[in-house]
Amino acid sequence: MFPVQDVSEKIRQIKKGDRLAREDFLENCKPFVFRAACKFSGRVLEWGRDDELAVALIAFDEAIERYREDSGVPFPAFARMVIVSRLADHRRRENRNARVNIPLPAGDYVIESESNRAWEVFWEEEAAREREEEIKEYEKLLNLYGVTFEELVRCSPRHRDTRRSLLQAARVLVERDDLFAEFIDKKKLPLLEATDGAARASR
């Protein structure tokens, strides 16, 4: 599981120039970078000793700058692709006198410098895998509250005004620490307080 929950908000904050947010994000995501680099290298790496980890961390920082929310691809999948790309470049530089094929870490495809189709397939598989993992994690979270996907679909409001009101209530819930703490503790929405807050906010 990716170590940071609200990834998009973190990235927006970083792109606004928040250096502390960037440093905190990089530090929290080092286990993710470590796993991606080790998987590519096929061995356990060590911070401060193996160049691959330094290359991977720089690549992760690059991914933050290059990521676009409207791409439709989860950030972890995008970041992993950039890491793999930069590690592949690093390995080629180390083997510049020999023609090498570098295996992608998550698939049966072999990448050469001109093999664009392999990258496209890898991208698609990584994005699909990330979405599958996110859905599984979301399902586990729903189970804590005794809710299933089927119930979500069945109870989803169809009227636009109702959906808008519930979205506003949800925003109030996450912005109010007291309401959110009550929700986590009781596993029950303080809907009256949240909707009252949403109504006041919309005035």
Image: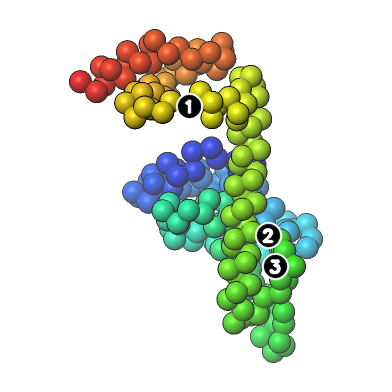
Q: Which mark is residue 104?
A: 3
Q: State the CA–CA distance, disc 3 to disc 1.
A: 41 Å
Tell me the quarter of the image containing the C terminus.
Answer: top left
Q: Position of residue 29 (x, y in %)?
A: 58, 47
Measure the alpha-carbon separation of dots 2 and 1: 41 Å
Amino acid type for the residue under numbered disc 2? Ala
Query: From the image, which quarter does the N terminus lie in?
Result: top right
Residue 50 visible at all: no
* Colour mapping: rainbow
Q: Residue at x 78, y 63 (%)?
A: 42
Circle 1: is it few (<14), some (14-19), or many (20+) Cα within 10 Å? few
Residue hosting label 2: 37
Q: CA distance from mark 3 to mark 2?
A: 12 Å
Mark 3 vs mark 2: give the one in front.
3
Q: Is residue 160 above or below residue 52?
A: above
- Residue 106 percent coordinates (x, y): 71, 61
Q: Position of residue 44 (x, y in %)?
A: 78, 57
Which numbered disc, 3 or 1, marks the residue that appears first in the sequence?
3
Q: Label for residue 156?
A: 1
Q: Quadrant of residue 28?
A: top right
Q: Earlier in the sequence, mark 2 or mark 1?
A: 2
Q: Does 17 appear above or below 201?
A: below
Label 1 near label 2: C-beta < 8 Å? no
Task: Check the image and name the residue furthest to the bottom.
Answer: 97
Count of picture labels: 3
Element at label 3? loop
Where 150 falls versus 44 (above or below)?
Answer: above
